[in-house]
Image (cartoon, coloured by chain):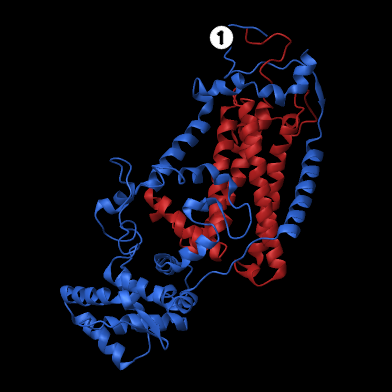
């Protein structure tokens, strides 16, 4: 077939050659059986990972100082969640990631409102059974002005460098810190008893399947991250495509994960949106390949197709 | 009932259109062009087969609820089947995709077949992500808390909250599988309508000289 206007990367020649018998149902059935057997073999030999989830209880028992330090960061507004910005709380646009003038995260605004100090510390403490010391501390906190609270928290934060966990209690030699020592200590005890897990999960309703608060609180601490490092799950360890144990994980994300290993993506504060932008461009390019002159010629020019259809080309000779 | 009345029926019109677009001999062919002779063609049907195993094992997990597999040996084994069928699914799909790329399988009016295949790949990635964050274990915690930043940076985290277990589970077992099965159906029907793309040259001399 030789005709004018034929575009080899867009048009396909008409097949006038022979046909061979093809039993599509038999092929599908055989494939299903083979894949089924292969799946069973892999499952029997390798199994699957299932490392138990950590809880606020397990975290605060394993690393009480890390827990208390994180609780303090929620209270003084320095935790990742407290300073996150959209979609969790109001922060300057600079707190959110942007791609040039595109500030998508900031423009969407606060849709999952989280006030770290109240949601993670003050409100859970209110759910505890009555205790005179805590009751009076929470009353003081509630009645104090914003500047007084800030002064208390600042004084406690300054002294917290020497925070210790002794005799089942968080100890910080802070002066002029108002109710903050009691609040942090009682929240740690509450977490160690398991009550904080429930309080964060069922704050609004008996039934809940939303772990946003608990997960944000846990991820603000160092404990989760330390365990993840041991399991080679950090971003700079190709963590997006790994999972616990020696399993293939999401190997299909290798290119996405690759960008996180090199600058500027690995060093930029806008790394996530930069990687997303690159992947959107590459994916759009691959999806729209049939319409992009030059790129759509690569398969023909690479001649890999001669390997795929080698029997056909052998017959042509 | 008159013939003209039958002709106006939606059902009649749809059936006639469907049969003219894809007659039974195209939908369930018993022959194929002789150039369809390569191991690369195996990976398309392998992908669909793996998807069937993925859905079947997912249905078994769904029968007993999302945390059953943590405390049951049988449940854990079914989870292992689910995991490995997903791995085979992606392995087959990626090879199928690159095979079709090097065949320039979009030629001859097959661009939509290529595009639906690419969209299927993307939807599969999102489905797998929602599966990972619905496992209710350490992996879920780590993956959801890390991946949320990427979704949030696009503004999408406000509506697609990886930390919301209930929302992710629903996406994973209802919405995304429906989308996947629909897209697979469209993709396969397009393949059947257009047939398998021929080689660049089908005659001894180049076809486009």
The residue identified by callout 1 is: A5
Q: Residue furthest bottom?
A: A132
Is A248 positioned to the left or the right of B32 in the image? left
| Residue at position x 56%, y 57% in the image | B132
Which of A282/B7 is in front? A282
Which of A199/A221 is in front? A221
| Residue at position x 46%, y 68% in the image | A223
- In this view, A304 is above or below A32: above
Image colour for chain B is red
Is B198 positioned to the left or the right of B156 in the image? right
Q: Residue A22 placed where, x, y %?
A: 81, 31
Q: Residue furthest right?
A: A21
Q: Which chain is blue?
A: A
Q: Residue A278 placed where, x, y %?
A: 43, 38
Quarter location, residue A311: top right
Q: Residue A103 placed where, x, y %?
A: 30, 46
Q: From this viewpoint, is residue A147 visible?
A: yes
Q: From this viewpoint, is residue A204 visible?
A: no
Which of A104/A52 is in front? A52
Quarter containing the C terminus of chain A: top right
The chain under label 1 reads: A
Quarter location, residue A79: bottom left
Quarter containing the N terminus of chain A: top right
10 Å crowding of disc 1: few (<14), some (14-19), many (20+) = few
Is B146 positioned to the left or the right of B75 in the image? left
């Amino acid at each position: 077939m030789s005709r004018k206007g034929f575009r080899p990367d867009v048009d396909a020649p008409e097949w006038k050659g022979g046909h061979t018998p093809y039993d599509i149902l038999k092929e599908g059935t055989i494939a299903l059986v083979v894949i089924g057997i292969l799946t069973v073999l892999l499952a029997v030999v390798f199994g699957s990972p299932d490392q138990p989830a950590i809880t606020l209880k397990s975290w605060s028992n394993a690393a009480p100082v890390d827990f208390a330090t994180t609780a303090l960061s929620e209270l003084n507004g320095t935790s990742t969640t407290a300073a996150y910005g959209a979609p969790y709380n109001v922060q300057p646009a600079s707190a959110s990631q942007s791609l040039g003038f595109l500030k998508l995260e900031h423009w969407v605004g606060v849709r999952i409102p989280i006030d770290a100090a109240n949601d993670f510390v003050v409100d859970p403490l209110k759910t505890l059974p009555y205790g005179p010391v805590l009751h009076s501390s929470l009353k003081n906190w509630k009645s104090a002005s914003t500047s007084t609270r800030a002064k208390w928290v600042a004084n406690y934060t300054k002294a917290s460098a020497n925070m210790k966990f002794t005799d089942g209690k968080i100890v910080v030699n802070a002066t002029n810190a108002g109710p903050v020592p009691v609040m942090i200590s009682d929240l740690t005890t509450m977490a160690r008893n398991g009550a904080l897990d429930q309080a964060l999960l069922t704050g609004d309703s008996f039934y809940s399947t939303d772990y946003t608060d608990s997960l944000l609180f846990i991820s603000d601490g160092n404990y989760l991250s330390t365990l993840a490092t041991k399991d080679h799950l950090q971003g700079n360890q190709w963590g997006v495509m790994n999972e616990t144990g020696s399993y293939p994980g999401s190997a299909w994300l290798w290119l996405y994960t690759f960008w996180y290993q090199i600058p500027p993506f690995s060093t930029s504060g806008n790394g996530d949106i930069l990687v997303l932008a690159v992947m959107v461009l590459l994916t759009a390019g691959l999806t729209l390949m049939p319409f992009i002159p030059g790129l759509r010629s690569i398969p023909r020019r690479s001649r890999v197709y001669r390997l795929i259809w080698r029997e056909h080309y052998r017959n042509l000779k | 009932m008159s013939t003209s009345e039958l002709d106006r029926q939606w059902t009649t019109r749809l059936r006639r259109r469907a049969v003219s677009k894809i007659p039974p001999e195209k939908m369930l062919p018993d022959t194929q062009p002789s150039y369809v002779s390569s191991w690369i063609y195996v990976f398309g049907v392998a992908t669909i087969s793996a998807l069937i195993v993925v859905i079947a094992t997912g249905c078994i997990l769904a029968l007993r609820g999302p945390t059953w597999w943590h405390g049951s040996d049988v449940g854990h084994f079914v989870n292992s089947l689910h995991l490995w069928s997903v791995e085979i699914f992606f392995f087959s799909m990626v090879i199928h995709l690159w095979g079709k790329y090097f065949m320039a399988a979009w030629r001859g009016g097959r661009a939509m077949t290529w595009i639906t295949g690419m969209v299927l790949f993307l939807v599969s990635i999102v489905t797998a992500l929602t599966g990972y964050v619905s496992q209710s274990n350490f992996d879920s915690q780590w993956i959801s808390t890390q991946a949320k930043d990427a979704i949030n940076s696009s503004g999408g985290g406000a509506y697609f909250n990886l930390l919301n277990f209930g929302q992710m589970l629903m996406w994973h077992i209802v919405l995304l599988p429906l989308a996947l099965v629909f897209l697979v159906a469209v993709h396969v029907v397009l393949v059947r309508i257009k047939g398998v793309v021929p080689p660049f040259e089908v005659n001894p001399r180049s076809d486009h000289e």
